[in-house]
Amino acid sequence: MADAALIGRVTAPDLHVMTFNIRRRLPTLRPGSPDRWDGRKALVGRLLTTEQPSLIGVQEALPDQVEFLSDVLGAGYDWVGRGRHPAGHDEHNPIFYDSARLHLNEWRQHALSDTPNEHGSRSWGNLVRRIAVSAAFTDTATGASVLAINTHFDHLSRRSRLRSAGFILTLVRDAYRLDPATTVAVTGDLNTSVNSEVYRRLTAPGRLRDSWAAASDRLTPEWGTFSNYRQPRPGGTRIDFVLVGPGVDVLSAGINAARFDGRAASDHEPVQAVLRSAAAADRPHAVRPHID
């Protein structure tokens, strides 16, 4: 029997966006641990092939995990991104996309640091390198421009998270200067909750909106997104987000707490949203985000 999709493939003009921290593969774990990649990867594959999002922002993917995702998603998907280490290895934050629906115009990887163009650089108090990947697309069905940004904020340094939030807003501001009708989707594990200053900075009026809060239809309970392989908990802390720019309609959103014979695919639950991607001509007076 096929797995039931929470959302599944959508048709134009809608876009199905997912953020998913797949949990990096660890080399030494006890047999039977729910964290073992060799026991989880088939579950990750089942979830992705069932949902078939238009855009997927992935976090914590090591090179072999990226290749696994590429194989699972198949020839209809491409991806961009590289490892956060100066040599290009270590964790990736790749953006996977439906290449029939989205035409890639350009992409960049940014270090979350004082020197974002210096690959592998770090500052702001984070002990490990942190990155953001941005990709500009044209929606082949509607002609609209789409900006996807995928990131993973630091888990320890509040200062780093705040500076990272400011950098993401700068990327969004620059995109809106070029095209005020751009459809913006920011995916990421932000390692912070909706009660934080980081969240408030990102979602201040005129900036970005939390797709869960903005959705016309919520498909699931408000599960916490970091379950650590336990059963999902309603009302738990959300640290994984799909954020959208002004003028983007969020038709539905859900936190996918799928279990396969009681097993979770990752220690994080994927977050999914269906966005309405309007062509530029449909929004000539789009509101610019107020980013300072």
Image (cartoon, grey):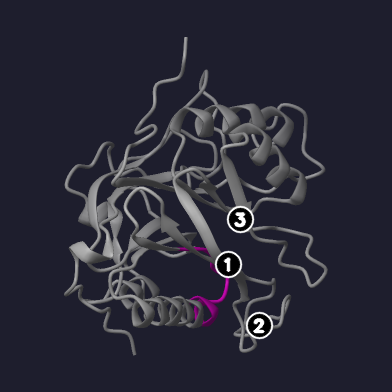
Foreground pick, 108 / 59:
108
Find numbered disc 3 in the image and state the secondary structure of the residue it sits on.
loop
Report the mark closest to the observer, 3 or 1. 1
Foreground pick, 209 / 261:
209
Q: Give residue 107's mark.
A: 1
Find numbered disc 1 in the image and state the secondary structure of the residue it sits on.
strand
Query: Amino acid type of disc 2?
Result: Asn
User: Which stretch is magenta?
Assistant: 148-161
Mark found first going from the N terminus, 2 or 3: 3
CA gap between label 3 and label 1 equals: 11 Å
CA gap between label 1 and label 2 equals: 13 Å
The reply to whether callout 1 and callout 2 are in contact (CB within 8 Å) is: no
CA gap between label 2 and label 3 equals: 17 Å
Residue labelled with disc 2: 117
The reply to whether callout 3 and callout 1 are in contact (CB within 8 Å) is: no
Q: Is residue 240 visible?
A: no
Indicate yes or no whether the magenta region holds residue 159: yes
Q: In the rendered image, which quarter is residue 111 located in? A: bottom right
Task: Give the vertical position of 270 relative to 121 (above or below).
Answer: above
Residue labelled with disc 3: 94
Indicate yes or no whether the magenta region holds residue 170: no
